């Protein structure tokens, strides 16, 4: 048995983590550094190109976490207190008059001199409008101290952070209206195969509809990239050469199909002629063959053509590569361990990424795991990782990579 996750080769196959490490090295060798300054509302999906340093204390002043009364705990001796002021959120209070309390609402600044907020549920307003408190109170209670979230000068988000709604909200809370981000990555998508036609046309003999094109184009758009849809590439060397040559102003050419060392591997031939080519046989299922190379200086990744293989290799290899080009540090998909809800009696020599879902806390898998079956992934919530050379019985732990994590 191969010890879990140990890097290395399985026979002549390259382990996934080895291929990933090489791809990431190559990504680091050609970083995308050009930046632009964008309004905060437009940075979703972008990568931060500056360290975000707080120029504020947050909150800027102590404020109330409750609707209630602000007072000095020592002033409460059992005798009801006069309400000397009313403080709403957005107002600037007067210092608290000694021996009184202040009516206060959530988010309002706590007046100087008060050291506690008591919630209104524990306060009784007397006939004379003085307030009696029914519970013991502690100094600091229900007060959100100044700077509890951030203090001036603190590093809040560092260069290379991917920005989403939460980071946008955080930047807004610090008063930032614009952020410096890495420019959009430009990816050209090519689908290779004489058998492919586009949906909307009538299927002829031997033809299938192109599913990878829209799958990858949408996925790349979700990642915040600019997609150059380069259409279908026939299995023909001349056209392959010519089409690759047209795709100059892009950061990556991403193609599918035609990488299986078969006779129709024109992508490989073109890369060998005009640049360089690395063809990897990966210890991964689905998705054994993967090409990396350059065509006249432009990086090219060739993913296997079967749609489930395209999905798995894009998620595990191409996506991290693209993120690292932008300087993102955490590029690997989220993975957690869950008990298997199935038996795996026959060990494989490749690491399997089964399309599965969680049911009652256990991973179950789609009945047909063929790499041509994209329906398995539509049924699934995640990829269930079964290590090479392993058998499983129900209840053994497997890795689970949520698709929701890798799709964005
Ligand atoms: P290939 O790597 O070109 O030998 O393709 C492997 C398998 O994936 C073949 O069955 C192809 O017909 C299929 N395939 C390749 N590209 C696509 C595509 N864009 N959409 C759907 N199936 C594809
Ligand atoms: Mg093909």
Image (spheres, grey):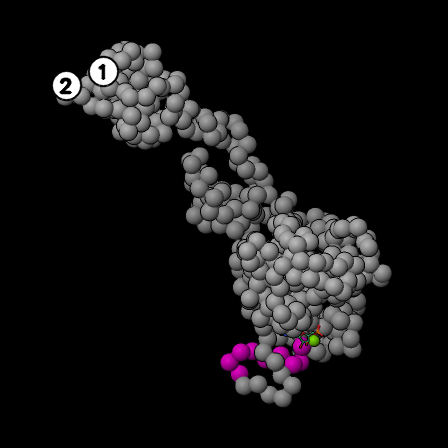
Q: Is residue 299 visible?
A: no
Label the magenta part by its dominant secondary structure: loop
Q: Position of residue 387 (x, y in %)?
A: 74, 56
Report if residue 200 lies within the magenta region: yes
Q: Dots 2 and 1: beta carbons under 8 Å? A: yes
Which residue is nearer to you in this view: 202 or 243? 202
Report if residue 355 lies within the magenta region: no
Q: Position of residue 289 (x, y in %)?
A: 75, 66
Q: Quadrant of ligand 2?
A: bottom right
Q: Residues within 10 Å of mark 2 (few under 14, many from 20)?
A: few
On the image, numbered disc 2 is attached to which residue? 128
On the image, numbered disc 1 is attached to which residue? 80
| Picture quadrant where residue 376 is located | bottom right
Quarter that holds the C terminus: bottom right
Q: Is residue 116 left or right of residue 50?
A: left
Quarter that holds the N terminus: bottom right
Q: Position of residue 278 (x, y in %)?
A: 78, 62
Which residue is nearer to you in this view: 260 or 335? 335
Q: Secondary structure at mark 1?
A: loop
**CB at disc 2 and ligand 1 closer than 8 Å:** no
Residue at the (61%, 67%) spot, across then down: 366
Residue at the (62%, 83%) spot, across then down: 207
> Gap in Å between the C-alphas at discs 2 and 1?
10 Å
Q: Is residue 161 visible?
A: yes
Residue at the (55%, 46%) spot, across then down: 162
- The stretch of residues the image draws in magenta is 193-201
């Amino acid at each position: 048995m191969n010890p879990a996750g140990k890097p290395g080769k399985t026979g002549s196959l390259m382990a996934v983590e080895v291929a990933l490490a090489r791809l990431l090295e190559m990504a680091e060798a050609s970083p995308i550094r050009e930046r632009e300054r964008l309004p905060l509302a437009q940075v979703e999906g972008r990568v931060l190109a500056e360290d975000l340093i707080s120029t504020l204390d947050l909150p800027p002043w102590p404020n109330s976490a409750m609707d209630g009364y602000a007072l000095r705990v020592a002033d409460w001796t059992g005798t009801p207190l006069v309400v000397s002021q009313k403080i709403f959120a957005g107002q600037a209070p007067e210092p608290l008059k000694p021996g009184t309390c202040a009516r206060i609402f959530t988010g309002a600044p706590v007046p100087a001199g008060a050291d506690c907020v008591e919630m209104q549920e524990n306060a009784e307003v007397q006939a004379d409008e003085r307030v009696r408190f029914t519970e013991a109170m502690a100094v600091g209670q229900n007060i959100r101290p100044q700077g509890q979230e951030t203090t001036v000068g603190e590093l809040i988000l560092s260069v290379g952070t991917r920005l989403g709604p939460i980071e946008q909200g955080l930047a807004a809370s610090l008063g930032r209206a614009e952020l410096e981000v890495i420019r959009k990555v430009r990816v050209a998508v090519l689908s290779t195969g004489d058998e492919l036609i586009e949906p909307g046309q009538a299927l002829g003999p031997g033809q299938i509809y192109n599913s990878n094109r829209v799958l990858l184009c949408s996925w790349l758009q979700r990642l915040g990239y600019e997609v150059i849809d380069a259409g279908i590439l026939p299995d023909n060397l001349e056209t392959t050469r010519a089409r690759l040559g047209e795709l100059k102003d892009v950061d990556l050419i991403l193609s599918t199909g035609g990488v299986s060392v078969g006779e129709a591997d024109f992508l490989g031939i073109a890369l060998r002629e005009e640049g360089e080519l690395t063809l990897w046989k990966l210890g991964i299922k689905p998705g054994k063959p993967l090409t990396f190379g350059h065509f006249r200086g432009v990086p090219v990744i060739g993913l296997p053509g079967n749609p489930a293989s395209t999905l798995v290799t894009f998620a595990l290899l191409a996506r991290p590569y693209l993120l690292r080009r932008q300087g993102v540090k955490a590029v690997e998909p989220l993975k957690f361990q869950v008990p298997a809800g199935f038996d795996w009696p026959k060990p494989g020599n490749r690491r399997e990424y089964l399309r599965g879902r969680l049911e009652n806390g256990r991973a179950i898998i789609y009945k047909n795991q063929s790499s041509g079956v994209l329906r398995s992934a539509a049924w699934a919530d995640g990829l269930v990782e079964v290590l090479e050379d392993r058998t499983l019985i129900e209840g053994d732990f497997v890795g689970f990579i949520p698709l929701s994590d890798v799709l964005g």
